[in-house]
Amino acid sequence: MDRSEFPHFLAIGTRWKDNDVYGHVNNVEYYSFFDTVINDFLIRQGGLDIHSGTAIGLCVESQCTFKQSLAFPGSVDAGLRVAKLGNSSVTYEIGLFPAGSADLAALGRFVHVFVARTDRRPVPIPKSIRTALEGLS
C-alpha cells in the first residue's frame, strides 16, 4: 500500500514508554496510533463532541498487519482513509509509516459503529462527521 492512497495524515511522536524490551514500539501501541489518527480527525474535521455529543463511535473491530518496526525516538506518519461508509458504521484503513518514509510499517483496519450516547443503540452517522468522512473515500 502506498502513501498516496491515504488522503489524511497525522504525525504522531513515539514516546520512551512505547518501546519494549526488544527495542522497538510494542504492538499494542500501533492500536493507540490508529485510535489517535481516527479520533483526531473526527474531532477536528468532523466536529465530534466527545464530551456531550448525542452520538459516539464505538470500535467493534480492529486489525493490524505488521510490516516493519517503529522505534523511539521517532515519529509516525499515520495515514487515514475510508474503505467503507455505511449508514451507522465506517470502516477505516490506517497506514503507519516511519516519518517521511514511503515504506509501510503497519496496515490497520478499524470499524466504528455510531451509537446514541444514552442507550448505545446504532444511529445514523451525524451529518458533519459523514461529510468529513466522505472526503476520505
Image (spheres, helix red, strand yellow):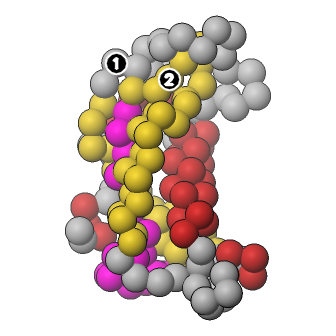
Compared with 2, 44 (above or below) is: above
Left or right relative to 54: residue 111: left
Q: In the rendered structure, which segment of residues is drawn in magenta?
A: 90-105
Compared with 63, 71 (above or below) is: below
Secondary structure beneath disc 2?
A: strand
Left or right relative to 109: residue 83: left
Does the residue at mark 1 contact the one at mark 2 (Cβ under 8 Å)? no
Quadrant position of the N terminus in the picture:
bottom left
Q: Residue at x 41, y 60 (%)?
A: 64
Q: Residue at x 31, y 24 (%)?
A: 86
Res 91 → quadrant: top left
Q: Residue 12 in the image: x percent, y percent?
A: 60, 69
Q: Which one is earlier in the sequence, the residue at label 1 or at label 2? A: 1
Secondary structure beneath disc 1?
A: loop
Of the residues shown, which amino acid type is indicated by label 2?
Phe
Q: Residue at x 66, y 16 (%)?
A: 117
Is 101 part of what is drawn in magenta? yes
Left or right relative to 93: residue 61: right
**Nearer to us in this view, 11 or 56:** 56
Q: Residue 80 in the image: x percent, y percent?
A: 40, 55
Q: Which residue is mark 1?
A: 87
The number of numbered badges drawn on the structure is 2
Say if residue 11 shows up in the picture.
no
Alpha-carbon neighbours of circle 1 within 10 Å: few (<14), some, or many (≥20)? few
Left or right relative to 12: residue 88: left
Checking the image for residue 114, the label placed there is: 2
Compared with 136, 97 (above or below) is: below
Res 94 → quadrant: bottom left
Measure the alpha-carbon separation of dots 1 and 2.
9 Å
